[in-house]
Amino acid sequence: MLGNAEPNATVAVRDLTAAARFYEDVLGLTRSHTEGEEAIEYQAGAAKLLVYRSQFAGTSKATVVTWVLGDSVDHTVRDLKGKGVRFERYDMPDTTHEGDVHVGGDLRVAWFKDPDGNIHSLVSR
């Protein structure tokens, strides 16, 4: 039934203005649509990311958005770190760390949080 539909990520935030500064100025996303003071939609490649105001912002303890970057994970980590983004460090089985990047076999992944504590991952595949 949904196999041919494209899903979009949604991220809850408390302060839409502060979130817009982060998603636009730090992550480099471009607005594609605004719903007044309640939501901003961003185009990101072929997908869309909806950032919306919610009292439940930042309550998830799991990854809310995964960015598939191929070979550019390390480069993107360096760029974001240069803009003040702090990366998370997790101890996981069969995984080593190369700076802020977790390495497991041919998988390279790094995690960071937005201002509301929503977890994003950058992955190589």
Image (tube, helix red, strand yellow):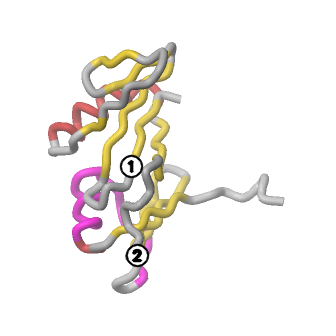
**Secondary structure state at the residue bearing disc 2:** loop
Give the amino acid at mark 1: Ile
| Residue drawn at (38%, 76%) of the image | 55
Query: Where does label 1 land, which residue?
Result: 119
| Residue drawn at (44%, 56%) of the image | 60
| Residue drawn at (50%, 16%) of the image | 106
Q: Which residues are magenta?
A: 18-35
Query: Where does label 2 land, which residue?
Result: 54
Tell whether position 27 is magenta.
yes
Q: Quadrant for residue 21, please give it.
A: bottom left
User: Percent position (x, y) of residue 7?
Assistant: 63, 58
User: Percent position (x, y) of residue 102?
Assistant: 38, 24
Residue sitting nearer the eye, 125 or 33: 125
User: Percent position (x, y) of residue 46?
Assistant: 55, 52
Tell whether position 32 is magenta.
yes
User: Percent position (x, y) of residue 75?
Assistant: 29, 28
**Secondary structure state at the residue bearing disc 1:** strand
Quadrant containing the N terminus is bottom right
Q: Quadrant for residue 73, please give it.
A: top left
Up-down: is 18 above or below 35? above
Residue sitting nearer the eye, 24 or 88: 88
Residue reaching furthest to the bottom? 36
Real-space CA distance between mark 2 and mark 1, rounded to the nearest whole angstrom: 16 Å
